[in-house]
Amino acid sequence: MNHPPVIIVGSGLAGYTVAREFRKLDAEHPLVIISRDDARAYSKPMLSNAFASGKTPVQLGGASASDMATQLRARVLANVEVRAIDTGRREITLDGEALSYSKLVLALGADPITVPLAGDAADEVLRVNDLASYAGFRKKIEGSKRVVVLGAGLIGCEFANDLATAGYAVDIVDPAPHPLGRLLPAPAAERVQIALENLGVRWHLGTAATDVSRMPGGLRVVLKDGAALDADLVLSAIGLRPRIDLARDAGLTVNRGIVTDRFLATSATDVYALGDCAEVDGQVLPFVAPIMHAARALARTLAGTPTAVAYPAMPVVVKTPAMPAVVAPPVAGEGAWEVEVAEDGVEARFVNGAGALSGFALVGTATTRKQALARQLPPVLA
């Protein structure tokens, strides 16, 4: 008897991980993976710190689409866009083809956030969000010396550290008063700021870019405060927005991401979502650890054993070797930071109203406390 396949839309970490985990549990059920790019397996978190180490896009890339098809005993469709989902007919529409599914997994990822910029070079601002865009970035930066990074969040700081280490002159722009403002309290963020400054990074905080224009010999970035920065290349790292359009157009419930319950189930029967596109039980967590936990739980559900995802405490490592940082964002609820500042590090603990540890941020030598503090944290999702 022919069974419609399990279809996974997306070949990033979320899509391929749930496919691998599913194959451990079910070696026979037909499996189709659809990718809008070349479906090569690679580690996206490595993109923001690969330059100084000299890693090329080819070196970062792993198994090809055909290799993954063999490994997963799956049909892998590369460079194919899913145009529509019909949850009533249980099928998806591609260019010139409709495929039925038994279960559908949306691992669509997220798109870089863009802000309106004036100027005749606004369209030259680069964004690195996958292996192909990293390859374009590597090609563009050849012969460059000056880089302006828009955004001082996790990815912006990682790129700034990487590029400055590689010898580039780096200016970084962000409206917030401190880098990593959504992750670190001010005393910890200041340590990262000073360390990158010592590498040569120049900070422009409390302002934003308004205009990117071509000038003889390069680009000029104009800021809200009136400053002008000359650059050879401008890289935007402002953040990511979950891809929800396909799900919304199919009638699925969406909010910040594609809304799912603890079983990764969307509002449509046998349609699931995970990874950067998903809002799981009210939380959007665009990090590696939640993806891995979600993929393992969803694989069991797809194989016939409904399994709710559980998230333990999941500290996030910020890849800024100039000043290492680890953060476990506070679990929702009121509380306050308690900060201990030492010469070689900062330990900040977020304590809730009941006096219990709810999150932490560590920089410098204080990062050695990561495991000890993580053991004291409540689960993110029990």
Image (tube, rainbow, N blue to C red):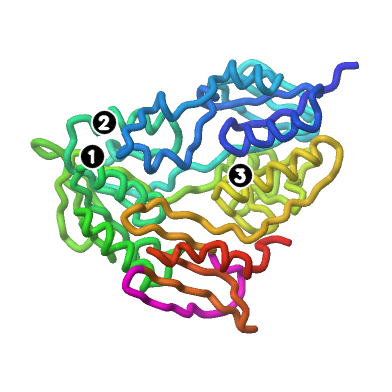
Q: Reading the chain from its start, which is encountered first: label 1 or label 3?
A: 1
Q: Position of residue 53 (x, y in %)?
A: 33, 37
The residue drawn where x is 39% and y is 61% is 180
Left or right of 124 in this view: 250: right
Quadrant showing the N terminus: top right
- Asked which secondary structure carries label 2, the reply is helix
Q: Reading the chain from its start, which is encountered first: label 1 or label 2?
A: 2
Q: Label 2 belongs to which residue?
A: 140
Q: Position of residue 79 (x, y in %)?
A: 53, 21
Left or right of 172 in this view: 39: right
Task: Tell me which amino acid carries mark 1.
Answer: Leu
Q: Reading the chain from its start, which is encountered first: label 3 or label 2?
A: 2
Left or right of 283 in this view: 103: right
Q: Label 1 belongs to which residue?
A: 233
Residue farthest along the right direction in this orientation: 1
Q: Position of residue 71 (x, y in %)?
A: 66, 21
Task: Tell me which amino acid carries mark 3.
Answer: Gly
Reply yes or no: does residue 337 show up in magenta.
Answer: yes
What span is colored magenta in the figure? 329-344
Q: Label 3 belongs to which residue?
A: 275
Tag count: 3
The residue drawn where x is 64% and y is 83% is 354
